Image (cartoon, rainbow, N blue to C red):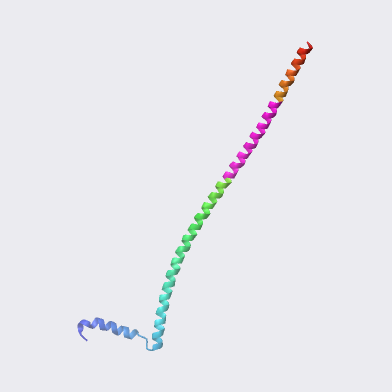
Amino acid sequence: RPVSAGGVFSHIDSLRRHRPASAVGLRSEVGMSRLQVQLADLQSKLGAANVEVQRLQELHSQAQADAELQRSLVATQKAQVAQLQQQLASRVEIQALEEKLNTTEESRASLEKEYEEERRHLS
């Protein structure tokens, strides 16, 4: 071996020392390597899935907050509608009372007119 290439050859020698002694050992090492690659791939996919789950949980939380706000707005609007319905009913009742009062006043005026006419007629 040339001296300048000693580092390269020593690396190759170390690879030979770590090489399995049998074909079964080689297959086992290759299988282990494949499993490690699969494990790394699955861990990567799991990490991506966890990120997606967290994103969906945040969206769900935001949707729940939005829904709660909408329910609150609906409750407020229902209360306003009930108040307006009550005001409308009061106005209708007031209008009916005003019409009754007008009718009563007209009747009273008519009776007074008849009374005055009879009084003049009797005098």
Q: Is 102 drawn above or below residue 35 in the view shown?
A: above
Q: Which residues are magenta?
A: 76-103
Q: Quadrant of the C terminus?
A: top right
Q: Residue at x 41, y 78 (%)?
A: 34
Residue 79 position, x and y percent, is 60, 43
Where in the figure is residue 11, as x and y percent of width and height? 28, 82
Looking at the image, the residue that sits furthest to the top is 123
Q: Residue at left 54%, top 52%?
A: 67
Q: Is residue 11 above or below residue 86?
A: below
Q: Nearer the viewer, residue 115 or 33?
A: 115
Say above or below: 47 vs 28. Answer: above
Q: Main secondary structure of the magenta part?
A: helix
Q: How many numbered marks does the figure carry?
A: 0
Q: Residue at left 77%, top 14%? A: 119
Quadrant containing the N terminus in the rendered view: bottom left
In the picture, measured across the screen, residue 89 lies left or right of residue 63, that is: right
Residue 97 in the magenta stretch? The answer is yes
Q: Nearer the viewer, residue 103 or 23?
A: 103
Q: Quadrant of residue 89?
A: top right
Reply yes or no: does residue 32 show up in magenta. no
Q: Residue at x 65, y 34 (%)?
A: 92
Camera-side residue of 79 and 3: 79
Q: Quadrant of residue 102?
A: top right
User: Can you name the residue that lies furthest to the left here?
Assistant: 3
Taking the view exactly as shown, the residue that stands out farthest to the front is 121
Left or right: 114 as drawn, with respect to 20: right
